[in-house]
Image (cartoon, rainbow, N blue to C red):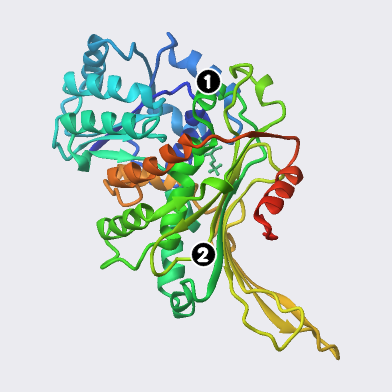
Amino acid sequence: MKKIITIFGATGNLMYKKLFPALSNLFKNKFLDIKTKIYLVGRKDYTLEDYLLEAKKEIKTNIEWDLLLPHLNYIQMDFSSLDDYKRLKTIINEDESLKDKMFYLAVPPQLFPVIAKGINSSGLITKGSENERIVFEKPFGEDLTTAQKINKELWQYFEEKQIYRIDHYLGKEMIQNILIVRFTNTIFEQAWNNKTISSIQIVAKETEGVLRRGNYYDKVGALKDMVQSHLLQMVSLVTMEKPKTFSSDDIKDEKVKVIKQLSIDKEDIILGQYQGYQDSINIESGSTTETFVFAKACINNERWKGVPIYLLTGKSLDEKKSEIIINFKNDSNNFKNVLNNKLIIRVAPVEGVNFIFNVKEAGLSEKVVPANLDYCHTCNYLGNTPEAYEKLLLDLFNKQNSLFTRWDEIESSWKIIDEVKTYKHELFIYNNYEEIKELIIKRNEVLIDDL
Ligand code: BG6
């Protein structure tokens, strides 16, 4: 069946940074059929040539243009004009063959209802049709109320199985690996609780600032941009109970359960903004948008009572790194210098798992020293492991929705963020990561290494 993907927001950062490279690799590796068509929709009045000229200025990665070009079409549209959706429908339906149609909304959430309505009213998607799907980028809404409103509207137009809500972290190799590491290794499964684990750290640090995304980012900030989605997804996978089966719905049921038991400690939140943020393009002067969040969460259930879960994310920090650190307790009083065991799931840029344990120093010394069992995930794969968006786009083409978020996951995470937003916090202006680290350590009276 001929597959057609229409992407709204084709002149946006996501298209250039993530979707083009992912589509290019999918064609290169022959995962997409040569009959596949890609309609790029934007508000600007471009020809395909004009569009590509602009796109090539923005795209920094290597794209196989020769492979991609035969599939591309650019369409200018006014997102609020029903006639334009009808015109799009005529173009898509040009030939009579049976088609598999996907509509990807890489646009801010405020536009979701407008575009979804246009797609529905013009008959581009018929409710319940198996071969018609719609994809929404994150953030899904601006808070709980707007997300609920959007979702209610979407359910009028589409069935849940036609709706794909993206959180690209779920497409990352090592995020897909969390449940495997936890539930297929007895050594970890048995130890995965508050008797053995002292704390958990969920970290997503970035070196880049807001770049040219000020328009979007200044209204959102790190809590809504990163914590509501990526960080809480990581928390839920790390802390959920074992699901009844490993089916998509059973896993999501457990993720939702644990997120509903999570609360963020009001006293321990640190919000920061990097020095220079306000000079970036499209940022309001005097903006109080946070570009950094540190928070201490806890999960009120038998397994996790008493285990702090530290969340840390921010822009313009010392390194690009996403990882999950499980710190184990240390009950050994018999030796000096014993370090706590630590399991590190490295999500990006390095993908792998490290386990830190104690050994005797080699030679005549009796000193206890740390050793590192180092599993490199990428090294076991010929070529590069697929980027998150490659996996998610391919799943979308293949009607696989297990790595997309279900509505109740989004709803429960917005509840947490909305609550945090009601607390009043001072905004800490940081020049560098060291300043933040000092503050965290001072406030928490504990030394959290590896932060
Ligand atoms: C996106 C956020 O969802 O994730 C960006 O909107 C952020 O602000 C990005 O930079 C980080 O993703 P990754 O895959 O680079 O860690």
Given residues 268 and 238, the one toward you in this image is: 268
Q: Is residue 344 above or below residue 157?
A: below
Q: Would you name the residue on which mark 1 appears?
A: 215
Q: Is residue 49 above or below residue 252?
A: above
Give the farthest residue toward the bottom: 364
Q: Position of residue 372 (x, y in %)?
A: 67, 73
Left or right of residue 450: residue 253: left
Decide which of tag 1 and tag 2 comes sooner along the chain.
Answer: 1
Residue type, label 1: Asn
Q: Position of residue 374 (x, y in %)?
A: 63, 70
- Which numbered circle lies on residue 383? none
Which residue is pictured at 49% across the width and 31% down the height?
A: 14
- Which numbered circle lies on residue 307? 2
Q: Does the closest atom of ligand 1 sit within 8 Å of the Cβ of label 2?
A: no
Given residues 350 and 100, the one toward you in this image is: 350
Residue type, label 2: Val
Mark 1 secondary-structure assignment: helix
